[in-house]
Amino acid sequence: MNRKKILIGTDTVSGIAPQILKAISLASYENSLPYGDDIYTKKCRNIVRKIFEKQDLEIIPMMSGTASNSLALSSFLRSYGNVLCHSESHINKDEGGAPEFFSGGGKLLSISNSIGKLTSKEVNEKLYELNFKGKQHSKICGISITQLAENGTFYSQKEIMSISKICKKNNFYLHMDGARFSNALVSQETISPAEATWKIGIDCLSLGATKNGAMAAEIIIFFNKDLAEEAKKMIKQTGHVIPKTRFISAQLNAWFKDGLWLRLAQKANENAMYLCSKLSKFSDFKLLYPTQGNEVFFKINKKTYKKILELNIIPNIWHKINEDEIVIRLVTSFETKFSLIDEIIERLKTSFPR
């Protein structure tokens, strides 16, 4: 049967929220100063300061998550330095060496575990290993964590604070890759953006809007303004000064307006929970991690995966467990419909027991 492909492996297949699409169009009708001196970027700065309850923060609008992460990291990662991160983190596995390139040779030191997140215990063990017998090693400049983590779970306030204490004790900076920060934030319900970031020790946040309704809009939020000054020195060299910055800032302004960014994330999360509850009923699908955002991970065998593809359901292969088993990722967005998820389930019913 010729069925339409269902792309369910990433939220970047989604479109643009109507409010944001309208904002892009409206920004085209008004000439404004270039390179971030426009009225839209000035407004964006004020909006972010209000949302994050901090008047002395600084922002840099960006077009891609890779550039956002890499410029943020290079604000404190030196060519002779290291940043600790999880082995599964996007900056370690999927940025093509951009953080090292932006920093002129800085190195990422990864920590592996099965939970997809750094723990203070493992960070301390890594520091002890590096300092063992006083052997010389590259200077550690900071730590980077991902929110949501790469396995779709979130760092709690307590977990971040325990890592933050290590940073403060050792004069490290703490960076957060927030490509899905909005999904993590709404999952924790009672936490404010400030309480989820600078109030628990985050020095800079790479906040992503592209996966959550924007066309192409990211923003680096520097809670430590000294880092913002460092980043501004390098942004031209890295090729990411945007002449028409107003089109990025216009997207962000519409995204933040009236809490749209949180409503879109909440919808994506609800879609993921619905998908998880339905798929978990199939014996061939073993849920690996709690669904705490808009990503769902299942362990399946290769025959199951082949059959899924035959049904024109396209998830993302996350990694290989052994010769017979793999992990797949399914991701919902703000525009995923329950009816689409129901269609996935109906297709699977033809081939898999429940």
Image (tube, grey):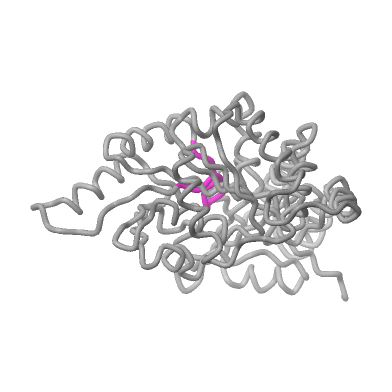
Left or right of 302? Residue 82 is left
Near-viewer residue (73 or 335): 73
Left or right of 83? Residue 63 is right
Residue extending farthest to the left is: 133
Residue extending farthest to the top is: 190
Q: Is residue 151 magenta?
A: yes
The magenta region covers 145-155
**Is residue 340 in view?**
yes
Residue 170 picture location, percent across and down: 27, 40
**Is residue 284 in view?**
no
Near-viewer residue (274 or 248): 248
Near-viewer residue (19 or 297): 19
For the stretch drawn in magenta, the main secondary structure is loop
Residue 38 picture location, percent across and down: 74, 48
* Quarter of the image that includes the N terminus: bottom right
Residue 25 picture location, percent across and down: 89, 54
Left or right of 340? Residue 236 is left
With respect to residue 46, does 233 lie above or below? below
Residue lying at 74% horizontally and 59% vertically, measured from the top left: 244
Residue lying at 53% horizontally and 51% vertically, measured from the top left: 151
Residue 181 picture location, percent across and down: 60, 43
Near-viewer residue (318 or 327): 318
Q: Is residue 188 magenta?
A: no
Task: Residue 13: name its quadrant.
Answer: bottom right
How many marks the image carries: the answer is: 0
